[in-house]
Image (tube, coloured by chain):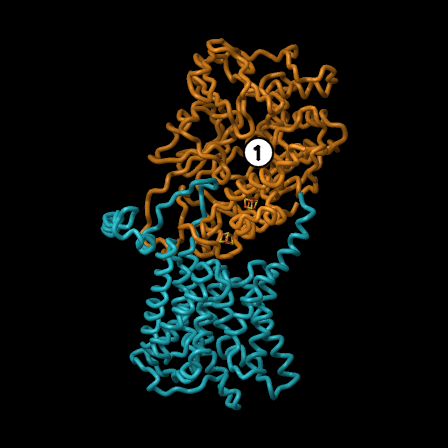
Chain colours: A cyan, B orange
């Protein structure tokens, strides 16, 4: 592996000041530091630092997503690979372009967005729409606000929201029927020509209720990575245990969703399906574990997190059951993102009032 | 006491309890500056032969606290920039103290408590006192509202307070009594570790019957030994007119030495620790002792960084500082970061110690890691992970203050209580985006003083 470092050392001057490819330095840096831990040393006290960096932080999310990716491959076939590649390529191009123009580093946050995005799309979506969606999400959801860390909205959700509003027909007609058997669709590459079918949440509005077991194991139509509750729970619990996802957000969403669901189900059982079913259906779990927990777009204070989570849980249930939309998670999280700064502001004020009398 | 935040970093290189006396030096290089002091008033002439315990310089800004010659020697004033050099150093029997030395700034009618304070100052014991809130040297002729006497030091790695108290419990108790004699009725808060060590119970037994000592137990978690945090935890508010004094066990022992034996306090116990030290231990050293002569024989690493102080708040010892300064409590030696790990971020990391739980080591019993000066990542924008707030012992929100300072919102930063920051460095340590929060806050506080409060000082 010394060899690779040698090559990098040799080409480095081209990207340094005065080199031919100076503007591409962010790309070179990202490549170099991807392979080799950065050479930077501390300049100030503290002279020692914790080994956690953003790369590691983000790779934890990728590991957490792995079970969902496997499930998506099993149920929807090799097409998933194409979608992931397209998502990374198109989103990465936008990210790179902005890094070069802004002369800033390329940020690891994109590694997560690029993988999450295909997982929340219908598995039969034409690839060019995937590309448009992720480019829009990264551009509008993140870059115009100044890049990772400054974006108020989750970029993947902004991309999906754009597609839902811009291409509603394609978005609802590309839910491929999942594969089954020992290999599922693992050996197939199928697009919309395979059978498509409405998602359980859409069918439930017509009175067709999918069995809970199918929702649990993922043997239903739905967004690529959102169908298998078991995979989401396994990966999500991993994220919570590593403290990359905050347990308060997850517990708050699932808790408020359950409580409100129970109350409404008993008050009006005809309009509201049992809460256990709702918990496993659609994007609720995926959103709770992987999207709402994005630290950048959720409130930073613990109090704010609870309020944010309750808003998302309750809003999802209400949107699902009281509006024309069948799935509420996406709008609920975006709503939560909007509310986040306000919630934080309140929590910070309360906190400062307590600090006032110190010292 | 139930403090918040805090975190114990496990770094290899913790000094053992053993104490080694350094060989007698030939030449001493006494720096004219240390963290708090600037000994700008030189009291000796070039070529003069001075005796041990002689005041060779004083700090006029700090109640003329003296820089004492630890040994007899011949003074060289211009040999090394920023230092007084003592050549042909010899260990002579210490002269005892002569109270008739003239000190113009001392009030005439001192009384007995005043005489003691004067003696403490002249014999180099006063410099162990701190204002708990501001860390400055307290006015020797002030009356404090309370005194904090701490036996714990928690930063990796500073001289542990218990090392000395263990051997000299009698002197320690006597030092506390001397301290009490300076006060009228104000309480002394003695800080002991929460763990039930045999030392703690011995101290407790010895002090039974000393009603003026309030014992407070503190968990052994960095940085709960910080004086400002202790004062806040004890509910002692800042009041410029009646400050809270704070002193470590080393200072208590120095008080005993100065007041019981009338000997100057020149030899200090310092720690020598850190991953690059072959055998971390405590050293008996004196100010001016050549730093290279301490480090070089005790490390086998090629490329090192020497810190004056601990790994979290210490400053790099620069090339132009030759000897230990008057306030040094320890030297920490870190290996410089040179190795670049291949695909480091995907390794399971069973040998990494991290505040987060993102490494496999989470599943193992805690072990100390050989940390280097590596930044361990690249500088990134804040991702609001909240780790800094979790560890902050001051209960403030470092990420928020960081954003406010970044936007130049000094007033807001002040309202967000940047002044409560005790500069422990834990926030910078844990930040995955490698933001130099501690540095920003030190600069920010200074900027706030200059921009928002400069008129107050003039008025
Ligand atoms: S803000 Fe200050 S007190 Fe809090 S962790 Fe950082 S350096 Fe320590
Ligand atoms: S630790 Fe760093 S990245 Fe995390 S919230 Fe604090 S400043 Fe932001």
> Which of these two is toward me, B23 or B445?
B445
Read off the chain for label 1.
B
Q: Where is mark 1, residue-wise? A: B162
From the top left corner, tell me how far across and down residue A231 is, in percent.
44, 72
Mark 1 vs ligand 1: CB below 8 Å = no
Quarter of the image where ligand 1 sits: top right
Residue found at x 62% / y 76%: A260
Name the outermost residue toward the right: B185
Examine the rendered structure and indicate whether residue A46 appears above or below residue B359: above
From the top left corner, tell me how far across and down residue B182 is, in percent.
71, 25
From the top left corner, tell me how far across and down residue B21 is, in percent.
47, 23
Residue found at x 37% / y 28%: B296
Examine the rendered structure and indicate whether residue A330 appears above or below residue B410: below
Q: Tell me which corner region of the image, top left, top right, bottom left or bottom right, holds residue A88.
A: bottom left
- Number of numbered markers: 1
Q: Which quarter shows the N terminus of chain B? A: top right
From the top left corner, tell me how far across and down residue A144 is, in percent.
44, 62
Q: Tell me which corner region of the image, top left, top right, bottom left or bottom right, holds residue A115.
A: bottom left
Q: Is residue A220 visible?
A: no
> Which of these two is toward me, A255 or A41?
A41
Q: Mark 1: which secondary structure?
A: helix
Q: Which quarter shows the C terminus of chain B? A: top right
Examine the rendered structure and indicate whether residue A293 appears above or below residue B141: below
- Residue B423 shown left or right of residue A185 in the figure: right
Task: Decide: few, some or many residues near mark 1? Use Cα within 10 Å; few <14, some 14-19, many ≥20.
Answer: many
- Residue A224 shown left or right of residue B121 in the figure: left
Name the outermost residue toward the bottom: A207
Q: Is residue B139 visible?
A: yes
């Amino acid at each position: 592996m010394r060899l690779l470092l040698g090559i990098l050392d040799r080409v480095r001057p081209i990207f340094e000041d005065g080199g031919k490819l100076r503007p591409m330095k962010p790309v070179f840096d990202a490549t170099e530091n991807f392979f080799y831990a950065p050479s930077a040393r501390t300049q100030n006290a503290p002279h020692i630092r914790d080994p956690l960096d953003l790369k590691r932080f983000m790779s934890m999310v990728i590991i957490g997503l792995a079970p969902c990716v496997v499930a998506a491959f099993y149920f929807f076939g090799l097409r998933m690979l194409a979608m992931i590649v397209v998502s990374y390529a198109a989103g990465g191009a936008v990210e790179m372009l902005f890094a070069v123009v802004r002369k800033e580093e390329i940020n690891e946050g994109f590694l997560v967005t690029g993988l999450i995005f295909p997982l929340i799309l219908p598995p039969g979506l034409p690839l060019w729409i995937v590309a448009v969606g992720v480019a829009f999400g990264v551009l509008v959801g993140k870059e115009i606000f100044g890049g990772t860390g400054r974006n108020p909205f989750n970029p993947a959700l902004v991309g999906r929201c754009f597609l839902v509003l811009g291409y509603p027909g394609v978005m609802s007609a590309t839910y491929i029927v999942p594969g089954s058997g020992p290999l599922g669709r693992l050996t197939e590459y199928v697009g919309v020509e395979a059978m498509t079918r409405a998602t359980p949440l859409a069918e439930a509005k017509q009175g067709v209720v999918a069995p809970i077991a199918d929702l649990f194991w993922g043997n239903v139509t739905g967004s690529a990575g959102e169908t298998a509750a078991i995979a989401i729970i396994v990966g999500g619990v991993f994220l919570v245990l590593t403290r990359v996802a905050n347990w308060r957000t997850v517990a708050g969403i699932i808790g408020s969703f359950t409580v409100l669901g129970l109350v409404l189900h008993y008050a009006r059982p005809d309009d509201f399906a049992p809460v256990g079913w709702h918990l496993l259906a659609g994007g609720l779990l995926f959103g709770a574990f992987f999207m709402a927990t994005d630290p950048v777009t959720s409130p930073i204070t613990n109090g704010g997190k609870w309020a944010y989570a309750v808003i998302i849980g309750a809003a999802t249930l209400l949107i699902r059951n009281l509006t024309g939309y069948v799935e509420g998670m996406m709008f609920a999280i975006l709503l939560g993102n909007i509310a986040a700064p306000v919630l934080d502001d309140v929590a910070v004020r309360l906190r400062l009032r307590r600090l006032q009398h110190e010292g | 006491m139930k403090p918040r935040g805090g975190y114990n970093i496990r770094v290899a290189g913790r000094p053992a309890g053993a104490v080694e006396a350094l060989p007698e030096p030939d030449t001493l290089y006494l720096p004219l500056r240390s963290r708090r002091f600037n000994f700008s008033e030189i009291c000796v002439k070039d070529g003069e032969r001075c005796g041990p315990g002689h005041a060779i310089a004083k700090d006029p800004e700090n109640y003329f606290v003296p820089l004492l010659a630890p040994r007899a020697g011949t003074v060289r004033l211009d040999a090394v920039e920023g230092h007084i050099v003592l050549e042909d150093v010899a260990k002579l029997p210490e002269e005892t103290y002569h109270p008739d030395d003239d000190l113009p700034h001392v009030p005439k009618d001192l009384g007995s408590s005043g005489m003691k304070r004067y003696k403490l100052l002249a014999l180099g014991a006063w410099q162990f006192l701190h204002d708990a809130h501001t860390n400055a040297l307290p006015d020797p002729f002030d009356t404090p509202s309370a005194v904090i006497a701490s036996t714990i030091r928690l930063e990796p790695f500073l001289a542990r307070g218990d090392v000395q108290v263990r051997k000299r419990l009698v002197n320690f108790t006597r030092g506390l009594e001397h301290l009490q004699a300076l006060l009228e009725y104000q309480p002394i808060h003695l800080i002991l570790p929460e763990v039930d060590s045999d030392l703690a119970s011995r101290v407790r037994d010895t002090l039974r019957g000393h009603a003026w000592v309030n014992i407070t137990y503190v968990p052994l978690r960095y940085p709960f030994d910080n004086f400002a945090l202790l004062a806040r935890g004890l509910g002692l508010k800042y009041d410029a007119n009646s400050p809270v004094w704070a002193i470590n066990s080393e200072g208590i022992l120095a008080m005993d030495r100065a007041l019981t034996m009338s000997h100057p306090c020149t030899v200090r116990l310092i720690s020598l620790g850190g991953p690059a030290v072959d055998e971390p231990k405590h050293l008996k050293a004196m100010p001016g002792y050549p730093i290279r002569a301490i480090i070089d024989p005790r490390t086998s690493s090629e490329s090192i960084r020497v810190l004056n102080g601990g790994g979290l708040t210490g400053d790099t010892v620069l090339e132009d500082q030759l000897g230990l300064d008057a306030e040094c409590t320890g030297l920490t030696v870190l290996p410089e970061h040179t190795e670049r790990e291949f695909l480091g971020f995907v390794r399971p990391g069973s040998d990494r110690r991290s505040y987060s739980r993102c490494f496999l080591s989470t599943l193992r019993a805690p072990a100390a890691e050989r940390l280097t000066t590596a930044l361990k990542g690249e500088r990134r924008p804040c991702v609001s992970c909240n780790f800094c707030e979790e560890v902050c012992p001051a209960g403030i929100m470092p990420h928020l203050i960081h954003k406010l300072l970044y936007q130049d919102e000094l007033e807001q930063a002040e309202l967000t209580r940047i002044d409560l920051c005790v500069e422990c460095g834990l926030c910078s340590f844990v930040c995955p985006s490698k933001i130099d929060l501690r540095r920003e806050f030190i600069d920010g506080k200074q900027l706030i003083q200059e921009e928002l409060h400069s008129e107050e000082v003039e008025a």
